[in-house]
Amino acid sequence: MALSNPGTPKTNFPTPKRPGAIFSNCTPRSNYTTPKSKKQDATTAYTPECFSNVILETPLRRRPSKEKNEEGSNLTVAVRIRPLTEKDQAVQGGASNIVKIRDKDLIIHSSSLGTDHIFQYDHIFWSCDSSSPIYASQEDVFTTIGKPLLNSAFQGYNACLFAYGQTGSGKSFSMMGQHLTECVDIDSDDYCGIIPRFCRDLFDRISKLKSHSHVAVEVSYFEIYNEKIHDLLATSATKLPLKVREHPMWGPYVVDLTVKPVKSYCQLREYLLMGNKNRAIAATTMNEKSSRSHSIFSVELCMSEGLRKEDNRRSKVSLVDLAGSERLGNSYNTDDKMREGVFINKALLTLGKVISALADQKKNQFVPYRESVLTWLLKESLGGNSLTSMLATISPASSHLEETLSTLRYACQARCIVNRAVVNESPHEKLVQELKSEIDRLKSIRDDMERTSMSSASSVIVINDSQNEELEDLRSKLTETEAKLYLVQKNWEERFLETKKTQMKELAEVERYKDELESRLRILKTVENDVTLSPYQSNFLEELEGVLTDDQKSLCDDDLLEDIKEWCYNNGLICTFNIDSIIIQDLANRRQACVQLGSINYSNLNDFVKNLTWAEIRQEPKKLSKMEVLNSMNQIYQALTVLQPADSENTLSLLFAKVNKSLQSFETALLNNIKKSSGQKSVTFNV
Ligand SMILES: Nc1ncnc2c1ncn2[C@@H]1O[C@H](COP(=O)(O)OP(=O)(O)OP(=O)(O)O)[C@@H](O)[C@H]1O
């Protein structure tokens, strides 16, 4: 029996030597208990003195990976094993190495249970011991999984690489390198990780491109810390969390994220270092420099050929360093740390759910992308338009057996995800390429003929009329094709620019309407006391607010703001959020306080409340009549109507359809209310 053959038929050998030694609940599809006689063959080298059960963890059936230019391609999954660290050795009794590699198998030996777990991946990097012949250096790791991403990006594919693993297992070391915040000099630093190597190679390749090719590079860098997005390249003093929105065509994106155009590796390196310095790094008992946030560094390429600099092929590469998973009890000694850990585990749990759902391969399986900011933003990379690789990092220490097995099982599952990547190029690109090759063909024929005629001329052989005609014909064909090519490119570029402009305009409009709706809603909320609204109507306002602020509520609003809102509500105060301030009104005592968002002490709500500076409300708060309320609602209704895009697939449209429906019922209810109280028979709407 070949242990490494994933196609081995499933057979049961039900006589384990020790009760409980077979993990029948590990991975049901792939569990495989080796017969006693074969077991010894398979594991003699690692467990000579004792009996070991063997569990084949890699699923027996994995959908065959397709070439990237076909319909779909599986995630590429690599595993890297770091060396034992001093910390590993410091645990009671010292830690032993439980990881072995044999051919294509990665074997984890659990000595307490006498079990070998066998996994297979696309690549296994043995970085435990630099004297080993199979040792994988930073350069090896980059060459194997980083370079292909760069190749894909130049072909116009989106690509993503994410590092996943237990805290302290070597994710940041692999992605960024040893010296995260110091000057990274790749040429002299063997410890540089995938990201700086990727960036340097990118510019090396750009410099080698033909003179008529042009590649524009833009970078962005952000982290997700406690489910909030922080721009790592932002220069402004107030660094408020950013929001996520989903565009029907472009997918999820971070609103107002800083995007820097870069022209050289040196310039890019400065941004990398700046971002790294800004990353939230906190100490945990497991790893002094453990990064407690997920970081996403993205490079966007816009490629063009020809004299005009408009892009006709685009690609985006996201390089993701996830925060490490860890057992809560292990390392959390403060509430803040516990909170961080809960958020990290929540995001990783959702990532697990997303991976499971995608790996399940059932049609119409619900994928909970929006349950965490991380998975929402990685939507295109997981099961979408991207060629994606996962680097699972593990520790070889026996003390981390449980976490290591969990990481490896995650990684196994991820191999089943199929993405559908397409080249992001203009539909005219094919035609342009065809015309270009036609021009090349014609040119070479012309050159050949001219050469022949010249050499003939020296030996006084005159080219005849028909040859001359042929040459002329070729010349005019060439001029014609060149003119056609110029026109095609020009038309395409103009149309592309126009579409881009329209899209930007459309997006800006949507944002503007949404802001308008939000401010109208705030007005309505403040007049609840002045007009009698039925519980249904008040509920509706809550609902409308919920829908409008859906994104921020679950994902981007600061918890403290929610706490303040709740506190105001409980104390009969009115709380209004502006872009940069909160206004708290105490109508009973006719006083008001205004707090700038940037000045809130985020750690202590009690202090915040005690330190409020109240000012007397001099003017009566504006009282709105029912008619004014109705007017406001009417305007919301109009704004909503404008927001209904023609495309029924548009998520925004679905979102607002819900509000629209409730709004209509609300209007009817409010109308009836007015009719009843004023004795009016009818009210005319101006919609
Ligand atoms: N391949 C490797 N070779 C040598 N040392 C390594 C390797 N991988 C990791 N290390 C060392 O192990 C320690 C932890 O690595 P690292 O900080 O990269 O872990 P991490 O997975 O990013 O942790 P966290 O999730 O907590 O951020 C560091 O001291 C690092 O230098």
Image: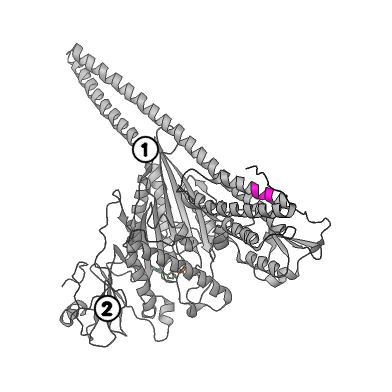
Please indicate whether residue 459 sits to the left or right of residue 587 in the image.
left
Which three-letter amino acid code belongs to the residue tagged 2? Asp
> Which image quadrant: the C terminus?
top right
Q: Can you identify the residue that label 1 sits on? A: 427
- The location of residue 73, given as percent across then percent down, is 31, 54
| Contact flag, marks 1 and 2 (Cβ < 8 Å) | no
Residue at image position (29%, 86%) is 20
> Which image quadrant: the N terminus?
bottom left
Magenta stretch, main secondary structure class: helix
Do we see residue 43 in this rendering? yes
Do we see residue 580 in this rendering? no
Which three-letter amino acid code belongs to the residue tagged 1? Pro
- The location of residue 183, given as percent across then percent down, is 50, 58
Residue at image position (68%, 64%) is 600
- The location of residue 433, given as percent across then percent down, is 32, 35
Closest to the observer, 1 or 321: 1
Closest to the observer, 516 or 459: 516
Q: Can you identify the residue that label 2 sits on? A: 116
Give the secondary structure at mark 2.
strand
Is the residue at mark 2 in contact range of ligand 1, meaning its CB lies under 8 Å from it?
A: no
Label whose residue precedes the other's in the sequence (1 or 2): 2
Please indicate whether residue 185 sits to the left or right of residue 404 in the image.
right
Q: Which span of residues is magenta-colored?
A: 630-634
